Image (tube, rainbow, N blue to C red):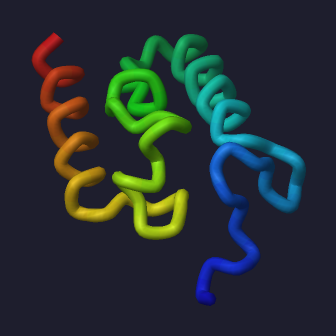
Amino acid sequence: GAYAHQPVFPDPNDAGFTLNDYRQAIKTVCAEYNIKVIDLYATSGISIDNVGQYTDDFLHPNWDGAALIAQAIQRGLER
């Protein structure tokens, strides 16, 4: 399909990086600049156990996944 070149969570992409690698890099850079991070990887409720339920292709969220992400963003902004 359209995303055939994309990794299937939790596999790495063509460059060898996983979603967690990007998460850690974002957190590191944001900490250096004192920028708040809403860690959706940790707080969205989407995990390896249910990623198929909340995504269409194990990468992009479906409507239910988007709702979980929106709720996590709201909680993060309220902190």
Find residue 48 and report its horizontal and vertical position in percent: 55, 37
Find residue 74 and report its horizontal and vertical position in percent: 14, 30
The image quarter containing residue 44 is: top left
Q: Is residue 68 above or below residue 8?
A: above
Find residue 2 and report its horizontal and vertical position in percent: 60, 87
Name the residue at 54% across, 12% down: 31
Q: As drawn, which residue projects farthest toward the bottom? A: 1
Name the residue at 75% across, 75% down: 5
Q: Nearer the viewer, residue 23 or 61?
A: 61
Q: Is residue 16 above or below residue 40?
A: below
Q: What count of labels does the image hold? A: 0
Name the residue at 16% across, 22% down: 75
Q: Image check: 74 left or right of 36?
A: left
Q: Image check: 15 left or right of 6?
A: right
| The C terminus lies in quadrant | top left
| The N terminus lies in quadrant | bottom right
Name the residue at 22% across, 62% down: 63
Find residue 69 and report its horizontal and vertical position in percent: 27, 42
Q: Nearer the viewer, residue 1 or 25?
A: 1
